[in-house]
Image (spheres, coloured by chain):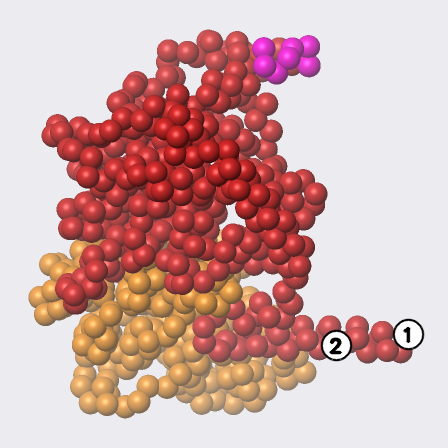
Chain colours: A red, B orange
Amino acid sequence: MNSSRLPAAEFEVEEVLRAAHAAEEGSRTEPDLDMLQVLAADGTMASGLAADIAGTTVDLGPYLAQDADHLRSLYRDMFLIRRFDQESTALQRQGQLALWVPLTGQEAAQIGSGRALQPQDYAFPTYREHGVALTRGVELSQILRLFRGVTNGGWDPRERNFHLYTLVLAAQSLHAVGYAMGLQRDQLADPSLPPAASIAYFGDGASSEGDIHESMVFAASFNAPVVFFCQNNQWAISVPSSVQTRVPLAQRAEGYGFPGIRVDGNDVVAVEAVTRWALEHARSGRGPVLIEAYTYRMSAHTTADDPTKYRLSRDEQEWQPRDPLARLEAHLRSAGTADDAFFEELAAEARTMASELREAVLSMTAPELAERFATVYAEPHPLVQEELRFFEQYEAGFAEEGKHA
Amino acid sequence: MATMTIARAINEGLRASLTNDPKTLLMGEDIGELGGVYRVTDGLKRDFGAMRVVDSPLAESGIIGTAIGLALRGYRPICEIQFDGFVFPGFNQITTQLAKLRTRSDGMLSAPVVIRIPYGGGIGSVEHHSESPEALFAHTAGLRIITPSNAQDAYWMIQQAVTCEDPVIVFEPKRRYWLKGEVDTSAPAGDPFSAQILRRGTDATIVAYGPLVPVALAAATAAEEDGRSVEVIDLRSISPIDFDTVTESVTRTGRLIVAHEAPTFGGIGGEIAARISERAFLSLEAPVIRVGGFHMPYPVARVEEQYLPDIDRILEALDRAFAY
C-alpha cells in the first residue's frame, strides 16, 4: 500500500480510505463469533437466551428481565445518557469543557451492564462510562467537573462503588482485580457479608495493553470475583479493532482459562442478562468472566478527534439501523408498552436535565492552587509545606502590590 | 536487644506488621514457599498462610496494580520487587496510579501500599540486578521513599512504612542484607522520614544513605587520621529529605559531601547540593561535592568495584573540599 505517496489533496479522503480498506479486506477482518442477542435491530424480542460456554449450553433465561416497566426504565436510562452526551458535546463546542468523550452508540452496553450490578459490587470505569455512572447513581454533573478542569476526580467513589475515571488505558483493570482479591478476603473473614464482585471496563484498544493481560492472569490465578467488560466499539481513536486482535476478543478468555462471551452490545436486554450471569458466576466463587460487548462508537473518540480522516461514513451508516435506542423504542411501541406520551415525557425530563446540567457546569469554579498542596500526601510532608508557604507569600506579594497601585 | 542481620530484621519487622494488622499482606514473586530470592520473607507463608503471603504471578505491573485495588478495599499490601532493575514493568502503575490516587481523588482516597525493592550493586551480579533507581521515584510527587542502612532501622522502618497512609517505597541495600546489628524491638521508633547524625564532626559533613553509610563512616574514620573531623549523616529518607538536619550540620562544618551509588547526574546528591546552597550558602567553605555513579548504565560485574563509590572516592572528594 503506497497511498502515502499519492498527492492526497487531489483525492477525497473517503476515496482514499475506501481504496485502502478494499486492499486490506480479507487479511484484516475478524472471524465471526456467535453474538448473544435477545432484542433484534428491528425491535423483535426473543423470549429466551442461551449461551455456549466452554462447550456447555447455559440457559441465561433466568437472568433476563423483560417486563414492561423494566424495559421502559432501561430505555429511560439510555435516553437520558444520550441527552447528557449531546449536552456535554455542546458544552465542549462552546468552550465550557476542555474535552468531551462521547458515548453515543454504546448506551446499551453501558446501561445494560451497569443495571446488572448490585449495590455491593464495585465498578472500575475507563473515561467513557457515563452510562454506568448513571446506573450507579453518580450525579452526572460531577463527571463534567473532570472535563471542565476543576478536578481530576469528581466524586467520592466509595459512595456509589463507582471508581474514578482512569485515563491511562487498562490501568484500572488491575485495580479491579486487586479489589476483587480484597472482596475474596473479606468474604473469608466474614461469611455473612453479601457476596460481591468487581467489574473492569475497558475497550478494544486497551485490550492490547499489557495490564489487561496481567489482570486476566492474576484474576485466573486467584480465581478473583471480577468481570472484565470489554466494549468493542471497533475503533481505538483511528485504528480499527482488527489491528488489535486476530480473534474475537471474547475468545481470548479461553487462553486464560475462564469463560468469554460475545454479546450484541447494542442489545440492552441481552447485555444486562449476560452481565447478571457473569457477576453471579464471579460472586459465587466460580471465578472471572470476560464479556465482549460488540458495539460501535457512533461519534468521535473525543471532541478533539475527526473520524472522517480514518473511517468511512458508509460504516457509520451501516451501524445506524442497529442503534440501541431505536430498537428498544420500536419494541416498546410495537408491544404497546410505551406510547407517545411516554416518549414525550421522557424528552421533557431530558430537556430539564440538560438545562440543569448546563447551569451546574457554568457555576463550577476553579479550585485554588493552594488547596492542591493538601491533596498530594495523606500525612504531613515538609517539602510540600515549604513550597506552600513560598507560594502563599509569593501570591500575597501581588496582593500587596495591588494595594499600593 | 537482639543481634540480627538486616535481612532478618526486615523479616521480623514484616512478621510484626502481619501480626499487628490483619489487613496487611505480602505480595511478590517467589516470596512464599521460597521466602524470596534473598530469604527476606522466609517462613512467613508457613506462619501466616497463602492469603497473607501471596506468591504472585511473574508480573510487576500486576503486583503493583492489584495492590492498589487491595488498598482501595482497605488492605495494606506490602509488595516485593525482586530486583531494582525489574521495577520498570511496574513503573507505570507506581507513577501514574499509585502516586496520583490521593490527589486525583482530591484527598478522599489514600493508597497505603508499600513497595520493597532490594537495590544497589556490589554483589557481582548480571545486568539489571545492581541498580539504584531511587531518583526516578523521588521525582514523583505522592510517593515517599526510605532506605534503612542498619538492622535497627530495617526492623522499624518497614513497620512504619506499613502504617503510613501514603505509598512508601523501601529501598533495601541488598549488599548489606547480611550486615549484623543490634535491634531493640521494644524501643519506640523515631520518625522514619528524618535523617540521623551517626558520627559527630566539626570540619566536614558526609551525607550518605543505604549501602554507602558504612563506607561513609569508614571514610570519616580514615579522614580522622589526617586530622579532619568529619560528621556523617545517614539520610534514611530520600523523599521527603530532612534538609533541616543536613542544613544544621553544614552550618557547623562548612563542607558537604553527598555520596550515593546512583549516577550523580540528576540524582539525589544534586538536589541536596542545590538546597544546601540556597539554605547555607554563607556557611559553605567549598562547593557541595557529589560522589556517585558515572553517567553510564550500571557496568559489568568485573569492573563494578571501580564504578562504585568507595572510601578513597569519598576521601578524594574531601580533599577537594578542603583544598578549595
Q: Is residue A234 placed above or below A121 in the rendered structure? A: above
Q: Which residue corresponds to the image point at 68% horizontal and 83% vertical from the top-left?
A: B282
What's the chain of the residue with tag 1?
A
Disc sitting over residue A396 in the figure: 2
Residue under mark 2: which chain is it in? A
Residue A169 horizontal side relative to residue A150, left or right = left
Is A10 one of the magenta-colored residues? yes
Q: Please tell me which residue is depicted at 46% across the width and 85% down the height of the picture.
A: B231
In percent of width and height, residue A333 lies at 42, 28
Q: Name the residue under label 1.
A: A405
Identify the mark nearer the N-term, 1 or 2: 2
Circle 1 crowding by C-alpha within 10 Å: few under 14, some 14–19, many from 20: few
Percent across and percent down for residue B317 are 51, 71
> Would residue A308 be found to the left or right of residue B40 on screen?
right
Label 2: state its secondary structure: helix
Relative to A301, is B123 above or below? Answer: below
Mark yes or no: residue B239 visible: no
Q: Give, as a three-letter code, the residue at label 1.
A: Ala
Q: What stretch is highlighted in magenta?
A: A9-15
